[in-house]
Structures are given as structure tokens and as C-alpha cells.
Amino acid sequence: MKCIQVTLTAGQLTQFSNNSFGTSQIIVQNNSANACRVGDGSTSATVGLYLAAGLGGGSINWTAPSSLGYWYGYAAQTTVLDVMYQ
């Protein structure tokens, strides 16, 4: 497993990585004071998986083949996500 932090720019759709290498598992954890949404390129303030604010606020564990380049996040305020992948 590798771990990176992804900073979501306030009010903008942010791609997790511009690399397209394959992954077999992605875990996204929101420990910030701001809620956010994550998903594909259509993620917005109302579309995507909702991760609540606060310590242990929300996480997802994606266990199907994917790529960090396919994942995006959106937050109304600047938010930092912890992302682990393999």
C-alpha cells in the first residue's frame, strides 16, 4: 500500500492524480473539518459519494481495478483527503 494526500481546491473539481497506472484497491479517508464528495469526473456539490467532516468523518474502500486518474473530489472549502492505494 502507498499513501498520498490529495488537496481538494475549494469549489473546483480536483483529480486525485494525473497518472493512469492501475490500482487494485483505493481507500479514501476524510479527516478534515470539511465535508466533500468523491467519484468520477461528474462529481459536484450534489453528485458523488459523500464523506462527512471530522475525524473519521467518512471513508470508502474500492476493491475493484481502477486508477487514481479516474477519481475526483469536490469540496466547498479546501479539504485534504488521505488516499491509500495498491
Image: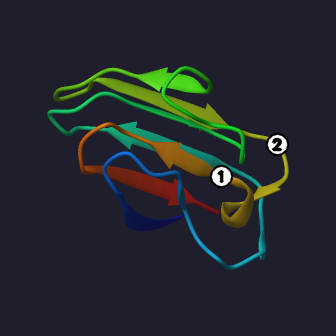
Residue sitting nearer the eye, 68 or 11: 11
Residue 66, quarter of picture: bottom right
- The residue where tag 1 is placed is 71
Q: Measured along the vertical axis of the image, is residue 47 above or below residue 31?
A: above
Which of the image's four quarters has the N terminus? bottom right
Q: Residue 48: image x %, image y %?
A: 61, 27
Residue bearing the label numbered 2: 64
Residue 11, position in %: x, y? 37, 45
- Residue appearing at x 64%, y 63% in the figure: 86
Circle 2 Cα neighbour tier, 10 Å, few/some/many (<14 / 14–19 / ≥20): few
Please give the name of the residue rendered at 65% of the width and 52% of the height, measured from the top-left corner: 71
Q: Residue at x 77, y 75 (%)?
A: 20
> In the picture provided, is 22 more to the left or to the right than 68?
right
The mark nearer the N terminus, 2 or 1, is 2
Which of discs 2 and 1 lies nearer the camera? The answer is: 1
Helix, strand or loop for disc 2: loop
Badge 1 element = loop
- State which quadrant residue 44 falls in: top right
Q: Residues within 10 Å of mark 1 (few under 14, many from 20)?
A: some
Marker disc for residue 47: none
Residue at the extreme right of the image, as rendered: 65
Kind of residue at disc 1: Trp
